[in-house]
Amino acid sequence: MTRAGQPPHPYGPGYGPDNPGYGPVPQPPRRPKRTLRRVLLALLGFGVLLVVAAMIFGKGTAPTRNVTDGATEKAGTLSALDLRAGDCYNSKQLPPEPGSAQPISTVEVVPCTSGHTAQVVDKVTYKVTDSLADVRATRSGADCNTAFKAKVQPTVLNDAKFQLGLISPRDEATWLKHPVIACVVAHPSTTTTLLK
């Protein structure tokens, strides 16, 4: 379709009052962005809910302590760094071989009259400026040996079933918050023997 007296347009018919062309351009198809966003937000919210629930219920309850002397009256779960001198506990991990290390995060603190696999003999506090590597390599063993000799019964020290060890922070960042070593006596099976 050309106007009278004009040659045909080289690129096809034009737009205008005589030739409306192809009409309005259709809208692109709607993508389900909002639905996908809602699903992703719901999944993220569910994940956060699971993490919060694990934090609340996964730790277990804290032990109940006697007000006068701080002794454990009712079992509960604690971070290994929060143990006190005299605490008896059960660890999910077996004691490591002598001379080796093993990560430990939480323990079940129990009354010392109940069956337990370990007891904290003493806690030694160091300066934050002391290097964790230096304390582990040169000082903690000697400090704990002094505590063992002073506070552990000789029958326990001479019994090969009992293992002497220590709990220390896992890294320098944790050390800066808790520059403390716990000296512990462990037994490979449950015992009710008081170690101090």
Image (tube, rainbow, N blue to C red):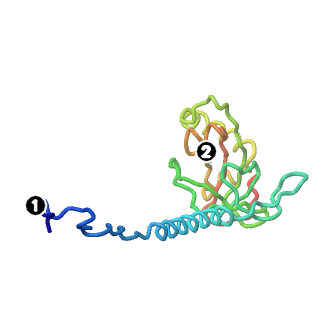
Three-letter amino acid code at the position of disc 1: Gly
Classify 152 as above or below 39. above
Q: Tell whether 27 sits left or right of 179.
A: left
Q: Tell whether 40 sits left or right of 53.
A: left
Could you tell me which quadrant the N terminus lies in? bottom left
Which quadrant of the structure image shows residue 33?
bottom left
Which of the two discs, 2 and 1, labels the residue nearer the N terminus? Answer: 1
Nearest to the observer: residue 91 or residue 19: 19
- Residue tagged by mark 2? 168
Q: Tell whether 70 sits left or right of 191.
A: right
Classify 79 as above or below 59. above
Mark 1 surroundings: few (<14), some (14-19) or many (≥20) residues within 10 A: few
Element under label 1?
loop
Which quadrant of the structure image shows residue 114?
bottom right
Three-letter amino acid code at the position of disc 2: Ser
Element under label 2?
loop
Where's residue 184, x and y in %? Answer: 66, 50
Identified at 61% across, 30% down, the residue is 130
Identified at 57% across, 57% down, the residue is 95
Identified at 67% across, 40% down, the residue is 180
Where's residue 71, x and y in %? Answer: 83, 55
Q: Tell whether 63 sits left or right of 26.
A: right
Q: Which mark is residue 59?
A: none
Identified at 10% across, 61% down, the residue is 5
- Residue tagged by mark 1? 5
**CA separation, marks 2 and 1?**
98 Å
Where's residue 166, x and y in %? Answer: 62, 47
Q: Nearer the viewer, mark 2 or mark 1?
A: 1
Q: Are marks 2 and 1 in contact (CB under 8 Å)?
A: no
Q: Residue furthest top?
A: 129
Mark 2 surroundings: few (<14), some (14-19) or many (≥20) residues within 10 A: many
